[in-house]
Image (cartoon, rainbow, N blue to C red):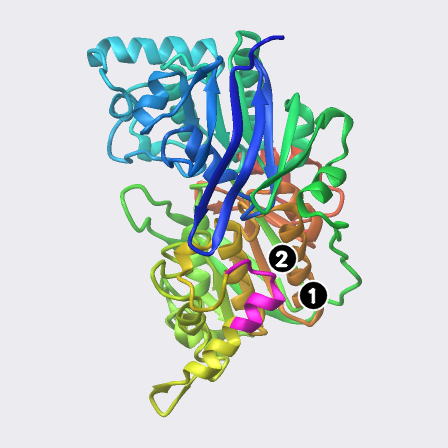
Amino acid sequence: MTVPLLSLQGLTKAYPGVVANDSVSFDIGEGEVHALLGENGAGKSTLVKMIYGLVKPDSGKMLLRGQPFEPAEPRQARADGIAMVFQHFSLFDALNVAENIALGMENPPEMRDLAARIREVSETYGLPLDPYRTVGDLSAGERQRVEIIRCLLQDPKLLIMDEPTSVLTPQEVEILFKTLQKLQSEGTSILYISHKLEEIRTLCDHATILRLGKNVGECTPADTSARDMAEMMVGSTLQTPERGSREFGAVAMDISGLSVPAPSAFGTALKNVHLTVRKGEILGIGGVAGNGQDELLGVLSGETLTEADAVKLHGEPIGKLGPTARRKLGVLAAPEERLGHAAAPDMSLTENAMLTGSVREGLEKNGFLDWGATKDFAERIIKAFDVRTPGPGNAARSLSGGNLQKFVIGREVLQDPDVLVVNQPTWGVDAAAAAAIRQSLLDLAAKGAAVICISQDLDELMEISDSFAALNEGRLSAPREAAGLTVDEIGLMMGGAHGMEVAHV
């Protein structure tokens, strides 16, 4: 029998109160693209951290080409041919591409030689990069190229990729897939983690499914529907969001001719932005990361103040009101960065519920915080949005990314806002949780709320949006009715081809 490239045998890792991996076993073959699937909290991150030397297993063993493999740190894993592209980029904005890549190398060559090698490798694999460009000036897709090229310069035997397409346009996804297929043809194995199941069906040869830390099954993605894979992940029938019929009411929020300078050297200025959203309407805003999404959310939520009449709620100017005053009026927001922006990492879920819920939920009286009522609110969020956690006393940072996302979205939705602004509502969230979050946004709109959904997930935007606009380099396109738009049209809009959507509908 052929010896697999990597064999995992009975890997177990437990943390206080939870078994992250429970005797997980599977093999990755030479030149195989192997998917690792599972809902949030299933143990995927812990497993790949053990492979990459970031976490030491409690029991079990790994074999690399039949030989014991026990990396004590990532440096050792890299030396043995394991490379990893993380979901969150680890790049310094102020440095150029070559300098960033050099920081990830044990013995980097002279900068001139490294720059030539970067050009050569990046062009060979269809991911051209200028080694002297400052990373802060790159798009999200180009930043991911830096991470990938940094890995490819190590000539890896196994490339681990965690949610690699979450920040890419459809056209960039196509380029990435060609690169991965070229790597596979050269014998490189790839361990691919993604919640986008149609991508898994297109790209992967084999899939292993984790649920609650255990290996619960395997499948051949090309022969398995996305729905069947999702149901294997969650262990139950998958509920798909139902739009229902909605009547649009009066304009809830509007922005007219808004321009705001970039908040930092590597931020994005908003340029002549026009935006209108009505009661009961979901306005979807697409765009590749770094094109002004955070800046737009800041203007809408009150974190960034403007001229009073630049932002209006029910016709009244609110541009000079901060977040607390806007929450009181019914404008709530859930930013993209869940740990550090939407939630304080070291605070408990109860304390995090207080941070945005105190005004609308009446969690303070006469200057004193009502912790009993706050705990009840946190428990309502946990129950309604199926947040997997031992309890509301646990710190935000103890939750998996997807479970914290459910808590953050649930905290805002349960406050019955008049206007809800969300950025990347289902980023890194499994299929069942994503469906539940999208349904909650549809239900909120059905109750008469105006919803602005900023997302890089085009399937998500098409599933829930009534109208669609694209954000590119701080400019917002004129909205179009979402029904009937093709993925290619949307991708072009996101890439800045504004000529095709200038007419209002």
Question: Where is residue 312 shown, x and y percent of the image?
Answer: 50, 70
Establish if 366 lies above or below 197. Answer: below
Left or right, 162 with respect to 109, comes to: right
Q: Is residue 279 in sight in this rendering?
A: yes
Establish if 439 lies above or below 178. Answer: below
Residue at (39, 71) in percent of width and height:
351
Marks 2 and 1 in Cβ contact (< 8 Å): no
Is residue 385 shown in magenta? yes
Residue at (65, 29) in percent of width and height:
207
Q: Alpha carbon of mark 2 to alpha carbon of mark 1: how far? A: 10 Å
Residue at (61, 52) in percent of width and height:
284
Left or right, 96 with respect to 433, comes to: left
Q: Earlier in the sequence, mark 2 or mark 1?
A: 2
The residue wearing badge 1 is 443
Foreground disc of the pair 2, 1: 2
Question: What kind of element bears circle 1?
Answer: helix
Front one among 255 and 78: 78
The residue wearing badge 2 is 437
Q: Residue furthest left?
A: 110
Left or right, 346 with respect to 441, comes to: left
Q: Residue furthest bottom?
A: 366
Residue type at mark 1? Asp
Q: Quadrant of residue 486?
A: top right
Question: Where is residue 268 shown, x and y percent of the image?
Answer: 37, 45
Is the N terminus in the top left, top right, bottom left or bottom right quadrant? top right
Part of the protein shown in magenta? 379-389
Q: Is residue 253 in sight in this rendering?
A: no
Q: Which mark is residue 296?
A: none
Question: What kind of element bears circle 2?
Answer: helix
Question: Where is residue 6 shown, x and y percent of the image?
Answer: 51, 19
